[in-house]
Image: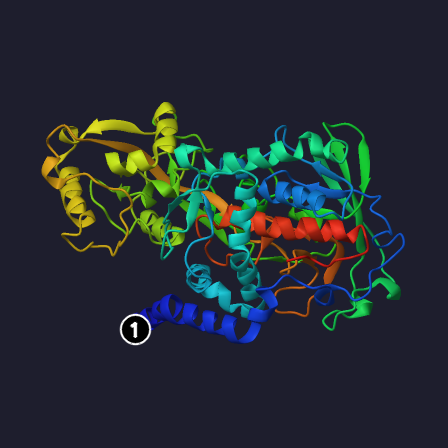
Amino acid sequence: MRRRSLLSVLFITVCLPLVAVVYHRLAISSTFFHAPSSSDIMTEAPAGADGPGPAPTRPVIVVGSGLAGLSAAYTALVSGASSSCRLVERAPKPGGNSIKASSGINGGAGSDDIFLQDTFQSAGARYLQSPKDRSELIGTLIARSSAAIEFLTGLGVNLKTVAQLGGHSLARTRRPEGGSPPGWAIVSKLLDKLQNAEFQGSFELRHGCEVTRIHTKPNFSNNVLKDDNVRPDRSPSTVVGVDFVQNGGEYQFLEGPVVFATGGFAGDADGLLKTHRPDLAGMPSTNEPRPGAHALLSAIGAKLVDMDSVQIHPTGFVDPASPQTRLKFLAAEMLRGEGGILLYKGKRFFNELDTRDHVSNAIMSLPAAEGELRQWHIQILLDPGAAEAAAGHVKFYLSKGLLEKKKVSELDDTTKATLARYAETALGRLPDEFGRSSFGHWKLDPTKLESGAEVYIGWVTPIVHFTMGGAVINNHAQVLASDLGEPQRVIPGIWAAGEITGGIHGDNRLGGSSLLECVVFGRIAGEMAARWTLGSTTIQS
């Protein structure tokens, strides 16, 4: 039994990534390393009331104002194919969870093959379920990652600081210099661009809008997708718009192609989360409590995948002043990437830069803390070097009382001994007992632990953070009425991007790939929807 377990681990960690990369190279690289052409999607543009019209008279409708929605809206407007865009958001402010993202966005460092291998390995055994479709999605994500970084920097977003996060073979996660949170920096820049004079009259953002229905009209033989994988008699109805209610008022209808970017369901504790992962009941979360919007997609025939795949982030801050509060601040993974360590009763217990699921599982195998919430009492500790590299984050966490500064001399003997060994390891004098190979900016000298040196310490616990499951899409961001592995049945007139989608991350999402996913597939969806208004679905490279 033990031998079988060891063989399984060996296969997932060594063989699976190698097989995936070889598969990627030999079988499908030509499909997802190039922009989709019109022949990939549609050979004859539908016309009339059931499809895109002859002129861009209908706006592109974007549902959700997180990074995926904003990327889609901006791309739709600058593509030259759409005259207008209407963005509807249910919250009173734009930005969604994207604006809170704290570690960065992946891209523009190292080879695509290494990035592929890291992502395939992180996806785990779930990758083997429909490897061709999953490889196409992952391949599109990675092939377009450098272009995503160029897109953001071209808008004026500073992404010059690069760090290595858990599960990554090298440093590829970018964030602004000077400590600005990456989610806020990216989202605010896109919002500024969308709301400036250039798009006055062509862009509208409405808050407090709850979409209640996606409207469709039946297809007929002259406007089904001419694709070998789509049977005309099974072609789904075409999406033509949405119903929404603004601030509890009357129902309104918006007509046009739709980009769905409403986010995941990690905050839907009593709804989708309870349905698909009842074992996570009672755990804190980084997400505002709100229902998922997945039922709206299911109602038009969209398939959902990986709904039981929920990411538990290993480090959410427990506020000492209010430890039983369910909604918690994320202790950004870059704190560990820059050198921070995790301690249980003063001792390290795992490689802090392993994948999120492995670190979370290691913590959750330890005794839980007492209280109503399911949480653990783990310390995160940063030396002055790590704290300086993460200065913007540390300043914020200190202001919220989530980190405190202590002299090493004030620590207990067990923690001092752990610090001494780790400091020797970070300097290359000892091998790391847990296999950690990157130590960020740690610089605390083991000979100066008693000379007034200071460290930063906080209480952290695993938290419900991200949902890997959602609507099935293809690498053109089209919403499908078919499962992964089946012949694709595209639902015409609707695209999706961001956490509302599934199939990309598998068992575990790499840190920094959430923002990347939003930009890559948001841009694809925005351009596709804009071209739909002209009767074209060609995407330019």
The figure's colour scheme reads rainbow
**Residue found at x 14% / y 38%:** 416
From this view, report whether residue 173 is shown above or below residue 44.
Answer: above
From this view, report whether residue 489 is shown above or below residue 411.
Answer: below
Residue 436: horizontal and vertical position, in percent? 26, 53
Residue 107: horizontal and vertical position, in percent? 47, 52
Residue 275 in view of the camera: no
Residue 92: horizontal and vertical position, in percent? 63, 28
**Residue found at x 47% / y 70%:** 20
Front residue (pair 184, 407): 184
Outermost residue toward the right in this view = 48
Element under label 1? helix
Q: Is residue 470 left or right of residue 7?
A: right
Q: How many numbered markers are drawn?
A: 1
Q: Is residue 333 left or right of residue 310?
A: left
Residue kind at label 1, given as amino acid type = Arg
Location of the C terminus by quadrant is: bottom right
Front residue (pair 523, 477): 523
* Crowd rating for badge 1 (residues with CA inside 10 Å; few <14, some 14–19, many 20+): few
Outermost residue toward the bottom in this view = 26
From this view, report whether residue 346 is shown above or below residue 395.
Answer: below
- The part of the image, by quadrant, that contains residue 133 is bottom right
Residue 374 in view of the camera: yes
- The part of the image, by quadrant, that contains residue 434 is bottom left
**Residue identifier under label 1:** 3
Front residue (pair 502, 104): 104
Q: In this view, does 234 lie to the left or right of 355?
A: right
Residue 279: horizontal and vertical position, in percent? 46, 49
Location of the N terminus by quadrant is: bottom left
